Image (spheres, rainbow, N blue to C red):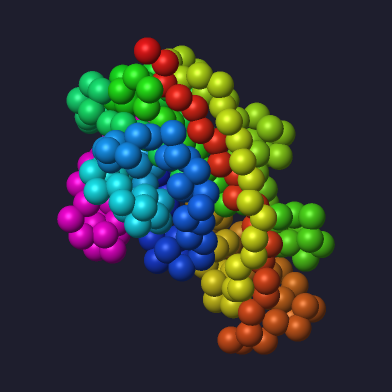
Amino acid sequence: MVERATSFGSETGSYEKGRPEYRSDAVAWLLEPLAEGDKAVVDIGAGTGKLTRAVLALGGTGVTAVDPDPQMLEALREKTPGVEAVTGTAEALPLADRSADAATLGQAWHWVDPVAASAEIGRVVRPGGVLGLIWNVRDDRTEWVRRLTEIMGGSAAEEMIGENAVRVAAPFGELEERRWEWAREMTRAELHAMASSRSMIITSPPEEKARIAQAMDDLFDELGLAEGATLSMPYVTAAYRAIRGS
C-alpha cells in the first residue's frame, strides 16, 4: 500500500497528461462555506498540482501544497511557480496549529487513515474551517469504459465512491456530497497516459504493463479509435465537504 501510494513520482508526465483537471464549479463548492477573506488553503496529496491550480484560480492566494513524493512536488513547483510546496502526509503535516482556513484532497483520501488524518488536519484547520475531498471517477455505466476498467483493474477510490464509503472523523462534522457528470475528449495517447499514471500499473512488472497496453489497443481498434482521433470519456466528479467543529 505504501509503495503504491508513493509510486506516482516515476510517472509525473503520464499523471499530468492522462488525469483530468478539476471542474471549477466543483472546487468552488468545496470552498463555498469559507468567508470572503479566508484564503489559507492546504492542498494535501497535491501531486503535480492539478487541484492546487484549481484552488489558485478561484483566488486562493495562500495555498500550500503537501505531498509525500518529492518527485511530484518537483513537477508541481515547475508548473506552479511561487506556491509553497512541502513534503508531508495527511497524518503528519509540517504546518502550524490552526494555520489554514481549509484543507483539500484530490484523488487522495482513499490513501489515508481517515481517523488519524481527520485529527491531524483538524489540528491545522481552524474551527469553522473546511475539509474538502474530491475525485474524478470514470463513469462505468458506459460499456466501453467498463471494459477499459476490466483491462486496467479497479481502484480503491472507485470502490470507495461506488460503495458510498467516504468517511471523516472528529473534529469534522457530517459530510455533504455533490456530484457532476461530464465528459472529456481523449486520444489514444492520453488514454494510455491515464492508465500509466495508475499506481497498480506503475508497480506492475513489465510484462503485465505490456499486456494491459496491448489489451487497451485491441479495445481501441475495435472501437475504431484512429491515431489523433478522440473518444468521449464520461466522468463523474464526486465532491465532499465537512466543517471543523469548535
Q: Is residue 69 above or below residue 35?
A: below
Q: Where is residue 48 shown, x and y percent of the image?
A: 36, 56
Residue 10 can be seen in this image: no
Q: Is residue 146 above or below residue 113?
A: below
Q: Is residue 202 above or below residue 239?
A: below
Q: Where is residue 204 shown, x and y percent of the image?
A: 55, 53
Q: Quadrant of residue 188?
A: bottom right
Q: Where is residue 220 shown, x and y percent of the image?
A: 71, 76
Q: Judge whether residue 81 is colored magenta.
A: yes
Q: Which residues are magenta?
A: 72-90
Residue at the (34%, 19%) spot, across then down: 127
Camera-side residue of 237 and 130: 130
Task: Give the left or right position of residue 130, taking residue 198 as reference.
Answer: left
Q: Where is residue 145 shown, x and y percent of the image?
A: 73, 61
Residue at the (20%, 25%) spot, across then down: 96
Residue at the (48%, 60%) spot, across then down: 21
Residue 169 can be seen in this image: yes
Camera-side residue of 14 and 37: 37
